[in-house]
Image (cartoon, rainbow, N blue to C red):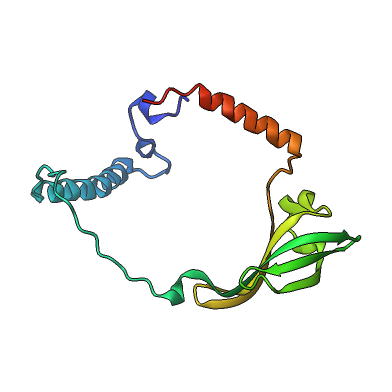
Amino acid sequence: MGDSTLQINKYSFFDNYTNNSLPTLYEDLVLEEIQLPIKERVSLLSTFETRDCDKSEKIELPLIKSSKSNLNYICHSLNWIGNVTEIKDETFTAVLINTDENTTHEIAEFEKKDISNCDLHLLNVGAVFYWSIGYANYYGQIIKQSFIRFKRSINLSNNEFESIMNDVDKLKEGIMWE
């Protein structure tokens, strides 16, 4: 880095890049153009009064009231709990229970492409999922949407459940209550 300004202690504009006979005049003009704004800035900064900040003093920020028209929210949504009964190449069938009215049972067929990639491995006969449909408001833009989310839980046999409960009882016995 032989051309570095730090190593040679001068600026590159000091070098004469013209064949003019008055290089010092150009150098002086360049230096004056650079130094003038610096001097003005230093002079301006010296006129400001500074003081230490009291950190215990609370600054109240203005509260901006948001209206529903500019927020994201879902309205008029219907929710079902589904149980997969059959899986085909491109679709799957499920029995649906309306969460608002437990008396309503429906049978519906869904396309596999409606399932997110991270949920596809959960698609099995007997799998439980949640299906919500409704209107979403994205900053004033109303969109009809359907959302499928599979339940993430493990199915335990009775023996596995009893084993876990025995382990819990052992841990509970080891707790010293004051």
Judging depth in this view, the residue of 66 and 42 nearest the camera is 66
Q: Is residue 115 above or below residue 140?
A: above
Task: Give percent across and percent down for residue 83.
Answer: 77, 60
Question: Is residue 105 rendered to the left or right of residue 9?
Answer: right
Name the residue: 27% across, 43% down: 31
Question: Is residue 9 rendered to the left or right of residue 69?
Answer: left
Q: Is residue 71 above or below residue 30?
A: below
Name the residue: 61% across, 76% down: 143
Judging depth in this view, the residue of 150 and 51 nearest the camera is 150
Judging depth in this view, the residue of 4 and 160 nearest the camera is 160
Question: Is residue 72 rendered to the left or right of residue 61?
Answer: right
Judging depth in this view, the residue of 116 and 173 nearest the camera is 173
Name the residue: 76% across, 64% down: 114
Q: Is residue 13 above or below residue 91?
A: above
Say which quarter of the image contains residue 164. Answer: top right
Q: Is residue 71 above or below residue 12?
A: below
Name the quadrant of the C terminus.
top left
Task: Give percent across and percent down for residue 34.
Answer: 27, 46
Task: Give percent across and percent down for residue 24.
Answer: 29, 40
